[in-house]
Amino acid sequence: MEYVSRVPRWPLGGLVDDLYYLEGVPPYARLMLPPMPAALLIVNLGAPFQIRGGADRELAEYADGCVISMPTRAFEFGYPVPTRSVGVHLKPWGLAPFLPMPAAELCDRPVTIEQVWGRAAVAELRDRLATADGPDEMLTLLEDELMRRLCETAGLGLVRSTSSLLDATSGAAAIGDLSSAAGVSSTQLTKRFKEVIGVTPKRLARTYRFTATVFAIDPAGPIDWGDLAGGAGYFDQAHFGHEFRAFTGFTPTRYVEVRRRFLREHPGHVLDGWPLPAD
């Protein structure tokens, strides 16, 4: 697969991790994405893809693309062969300035870009992207579109600064201490988080901790689960295992088996690191 990525200019840099272009044959027809502290926007340029989100039993089809606020559970993606799209990996708070509704309304509920930006605007954007001269120009067009749509968002500064502290501590900072430092009540902080990110500060902290723990796993080597759980601040190994199943649907050992399958079947693949084979 071809994967081109770049960091956008300011002020998007404070909201977006990267813009990307993706084209080619996916490593698996279905991929599972565990929750992570990020939001996602995809503009689809190929055949429709499918998503099963949260407790949905059926895969829903997305032709123009999709918008996903920070998830609390795993999502399953079904990719066409080949697939072609451009997208944005956003920080947890980064989606809010581009939404016409509170992020809480999208929690674990992917929507089409048309539902967020309107049919005519999305059709025009897709046409411009489809006729662009290569990935670099496509990413420039997407960046310009985001800059044009950037809006003031109430509470964004508060949520961004507090979330950044959770990120820096891998979710270990006490929520009460964060609200005190910010000069607001815990109720006010929670309200702003749900409006801007779609989840509570406690849920974001759990996601940061889980993500940091997963990235600390070396699937190619031996793993001491007790040391890993203790180092990540989990009360005990049972609590750690419960969190793993809640986030991924897998036990820790099953997760490593699936990661090892990806490494074995697609060594060095551009998507290696977070998606897992779901078929």
Image (tube, rainbow, N blue to C red):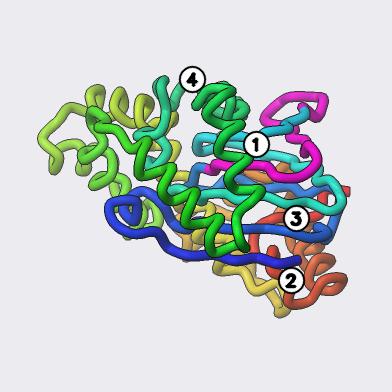
Mark 4–mark 3 distance (CA, rounded to whole Å): 27 Å
Question: Distance from label 2 to label 4 (Cα)?
Answer: 34 Å
Q: Is residue 235 visible?
A: no
Compare residues 216 and 71 and report the one nearer the observer: 71
Magenta-highlighted residues: 40-60
Q: Which of the two discs, 1 and 4, labels the residue nearer the N terminus?
A: 1
x and y percent of residue 240 in the render? Answer: 58, 51
Mark 2 = which residue? 269
Identified by mark 1, the residue type is Gly
Residue type highlighted by circle 4: Glu
Mark in the foreground, 4 or 3? 4
Disc on res. 276: 3
Q: CA distance from mark 1 to mark 4?
A: 18 Å
Tell me where residue 72 sits by quadrant. Answer: top right
Q: For residue 65, which numbered disc appears in the image?
A: 1
Location of residue 24 in the rendering, given as x and y in whole percent from the top left corner: 79, 60
Q: Determine whether the residue tagged by mark 3 lies in a helix, strand or loop.
A: strand
Q: In this orientation, which residue lies closer to the viewer: 155 or 169?
A: 155
